[in-house]
Image (cartoon, rainbow, N blue to C red):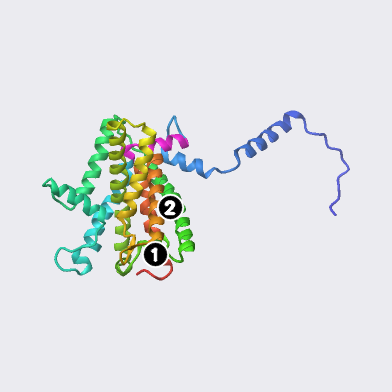
Amino acid sequence: MPQQSKSKRRPPTSSNASPRRTSKRRSRASGGPDPTGALLRFAVGPSNRPGLGWYLELSQRPLQILIFLLPLIALYEVGTWLYTSGAAIGASGDEAITISAYKLLIDFFGAFGVGGLYLPGLALITVLLLWHVLSRDPWEVHLGVPVVMLVEAFLLAVPLLVLDQLINRLFAGGGGAALMSGPVIESLPWQARLTLSIGAGLYEELLFRMIIIALVHMLLVDFGRMKSGQGALIALIVSAVAFTFYHDVRIDGVIQPERVAFFLVSGLFFASVYVVRGFGVVVGAHAMYDVLVIVILPLLTGGGE
């Protein structure tokens, strides 16, 4: 045992002890490193209104949404040209694999005599810019916000992965990954599947959330004089039902309950995210989920090229 000194030590005075105790209290109060706070500070940058509330507000502003979505729009257009066009998949003529919602939007523009493969993307950019101008928000961009939005999108994709597993258990293999994939999707290279995943996030959310919810809400509230909350609830349900039957829910002409259950709950989830967190985040969450189930998981399990 070490020897103990016999010399008596004077107890520390209050002036000496106080700083140590104060520093310990501060250390415990701060709880050490705060990764969430650091992430939020990175997102909003120097601001007199830092924190979660400021990020939640910024991430719903149209200019920040545009900055977040521009890379996705570009990736989809380039990926379509390189990996899902008729030439890329070896199809004859102008045949190509594309998102049905994207084609519906092109057909809509075509009905008014306006053509062009890039119109849905250009229309989305134009809508966000007009929204920004009409909102009279400053032309101020926080480049950290899209990064945190991407993290948030990943976190919001997790509940859908849980739903996927639940549907798998209840219906013996009828989960979201099984429903969204198929012989055509599975035969595509991962770059083409990534392109389609991004396109689904962009243009299915544009059609079923931004357009349908706004249209139904306007008809019920502005013209039907219904209360705003009631109109919003009905609009969410209508968009979810439309989203469900937009997908293929039949096998040999028979509606499959597992398909209806998955797409209906997913549609309600996306509609809720859209209302609470805005268009940019719901696009990110949708695209992230699709990327996980038809690109990343197949690659990890050896089922993708």
Q: Is residue 69 above or below residue 302?
A: above
Residue occupying the point 32% across, 34% down: 140
How many numbered marks have been drawn onto this rendered protein structure? Answer: 2
Q: Look at the image and give the residue range highlighted in magenta.
A: 51-64
Quarter occupied by the N terminus = bottom right
Q: Mark 2 points at which residue?
A: 157
- Local packing at callout 2 (Cα closer than 10 Å; few below 14, some 14-19, many 20+) is many
Q: Nearer the viewer, residue 131 or 268?
A: 268
Asked if one can make out residue 76 in the rendered structure from this viewpoint, the answer is yes
| Amino acid residing under circle 2 | Ala
Residue 209 image position (x, y, % from top left): 32, 45
Q: Mark 1 points at which residue?
A: 178
Residue 169 image position (x, y, % from top left): 49, 63
- Residue at the extreme right: 6
Q: Name the secondary structure under disc 2.
A: helix
Q: Name the secondary structure under disc 1.
A: helix
Q: Does the magenta stretch include residue 289?
A: no
| Amino acid residing under circle 1 | Ala
Residue occupying the point 31% across, 35% down: 220
**Location of residue 190 (image quadrant):** bottom left
Q: Is residue 52 magenta?
A: yes
Residue occupying the point 19% across, 68% down: 91
Q: Is residue 79 above or below residue 51?
A: below
**Location of residue 214 (image quadrant):** top left
Q: Is residue 56 above or below residue 262?
A: above
Q: Is the magenta stretch mostly helix, strand or loop?
A: helix
Q: Of the residues tagged 1 and 2, which is closer to the observer? A: 1
Residue occupying the point 33% across, 51% down: 243
Quarter occupied by the C terminus = bottom left
